[in-house]
Image (spheres, rainbow, N blue to C red):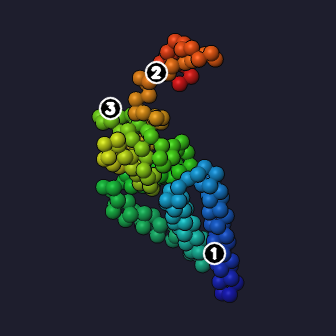
Amino acid sequence: MITKVSIVVFSVALMFYLNRIVTSILLKFADKNRMSALRLGYVQKAINIGFLLLGFILVCFLFGLGYQQVFIFLSSFLAVLGIALVAQWSILSNITAGVIIFFAFPYRIGDRIKVVDKDDDISGRIVEIALFHVLIRRADGSTVTYPNSIILQKAVIKLTGNASPVNEVSVVKSADNTELTPVSKKEDPQC
């Protein structure tokens, strides 16, 4: 019995150590990509819950519960959870999308974006990127809450400067300060 307890204590300590390693890698990734602390906190919570679940399964196996007993318990728990969330199945997809957005979303808080949506003009500045949604503040001051799972499915355009940079005209001057032909950004292939 003492050996089982010592193995369990060692395994739990190993899980905490692995969690710290993953958290430090996550912190380095967030620092390198200048992610906000709020986004980092959401992803850390999701990873901690995953390690907690993995640790629970490991402890059950170490105490001698068979695979069948553990998986019957887990499947029963997940079935009850699934029934409880049947009307809210999108919660899980939004959490998954939130983690994907943390690692792969090319836009940051403060960027001006436009979500290509045929029904509504969703354009403005990103205020917050949370675990379930992205908050976009429009030019008129209103805030749009856009679900993470949908923002991954839509095309997102990064806007620079004005909301309508297509109509801007640049005046090009030569070295002797004489005006050359105006070039529209719409026609310029580099824009």
Q: Residues within 10 Å of mark 3 (few under 14, many from 20)?
A: few
Residue that carries the numbered disc 1 in the rendered image: 12
Give the farthest residue toward the bottom: 2
Residue 12 % position (x, y)? 63, 75
Q: Amino acid at mark 2?
A: Val
Tell which tag, 1 or 3, sits nearer the viewer.
3
- Identify which residue, 15 or 77, lies in the foreground: 15
Residue 189 % position (x, y)? 54, 19
Determine the secondary structure under disc 3. loop
- Identify which residue, 130 or 51, lies in the foreground: 130
Q: CA distance from mark 2 to mark 3?
A: 28 Å
Q: CA distance from mark 1 to mark 3?
A: 51 Å
Q: CA distance from mark 2 to mark 1?
A: 63 Å
Q: Residue at x 35, y 43 (%)?
A: 138
Residue 48's label in the rendered image is none
Q: Quadrant of the N terminus?
A: bottom right
Q: Is residue 103 left or right of residue 78?
A: right
Residue that carries the numbered disc 3 in the rendered image: 118
Q: Residue at x 58, y 70 (%)?
A: 55
Residue that carries the numbered disc 2 in the rendered image: 169
Tell which tag, 2 or 3, sits nearer the viewer.
2
Residue 82, located in which quarter of the rendered image? bottom left
